[in-house]
Image (cartoon, rainbow, N blue to C red):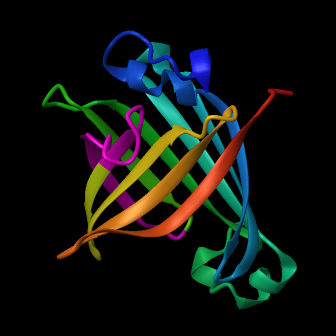
Amino acid sequence: MGATWKKGRGKLGLLQPLLGRWEAEADSPMGPLRCTRVFESVLGGAYVRLEARWVFGAKARKAMPKKYACQGSGYEEFALIGVGDDGKVAFWSFTSDGKRSSGWAADVTDLHPEAVGFEAQMPSGFARMAYWPDGAGGCRWVVESRTKKGWKRFVEHRYRKVKQR
């Protein structure tokens, strides 16, 4: 991503390259999907807010359990990323299925030298997510779970930056 993947100042500066609106299209077990992620600085720069919305195709909507429904066609996440009581960057996430999670910034440079990521202890085990530049003006996003053999990737999207309307 060249100059646009430049980290900013301060503890939340690692998120500077992600600020803005991003979209991805991917296949999933529930059919094709479109995911939009919007990162924006809020509360005087004390936090970065992430709003993510997953919209599934018609075939997937019919198969989607109601607990994952978001206006009948998707799944939503709202997260705040900021500095926790321990002085480290952390996140607090809430989803449309009523779940919530929290975690902390982590070194994910084994994926890419410029990767930005987080780890969390989830009900199903230890997981991480990471973002990094794709070299074409977009970014990649993955979610992985830790296994005895290492990290197992179960979600991967390629995002393109969308100009604000």
32 sits left or right of 103 in the view: right
Asked if residue 21 is positioned above or below residue 52 in the image, the reply reads above
146 sits left or right of 58 in the view: left
Residue in the image at 72% along x and 41% along y:
160
Picture coordinates of residue 92 (x, y %)?
36, 46
Asked if residue 19 is positioned above or below residue 146 in the image, the reply reads above
The total of numbered circles placed on residues is: 0
Give the quarter of the figure containing the C terminus.
Answer: top right
Residue in the image at 26% along x and 43% along y:
104
Residue 110 among magenta residues: yes
Picture coordinates of residue 59 (x, y %)?
82, 85
Picture coordinates of residue 52 (x, y %)?
61, 50
Foreground pick, 24 / 82: 24
38 sits left or right of 92 in the view: right
Residue 17 among magenta residues: no
Foreground pick, 143 / 66: 143
**The magenta segment:** 97-118
Picture coordinates of residue 67 (x, y %)?
57, 80
Foreground pick, 36 / 3: 3
125 sits left or right of 63 in the view: left
Residue in the image at 46% along x and 27% along y:
15
Residue extending furthest toward the top = 9
Residue in the image at 27% along x and 56% along y:
120
Give the quarter of the figure containing the N terminus.
Answer: top right
Asked if residue 83 is positioned above or below residue 131 in the image, the reply reads above
Residue extending furthest toward the left = 86
Residue 148 picture quarter = bottom left
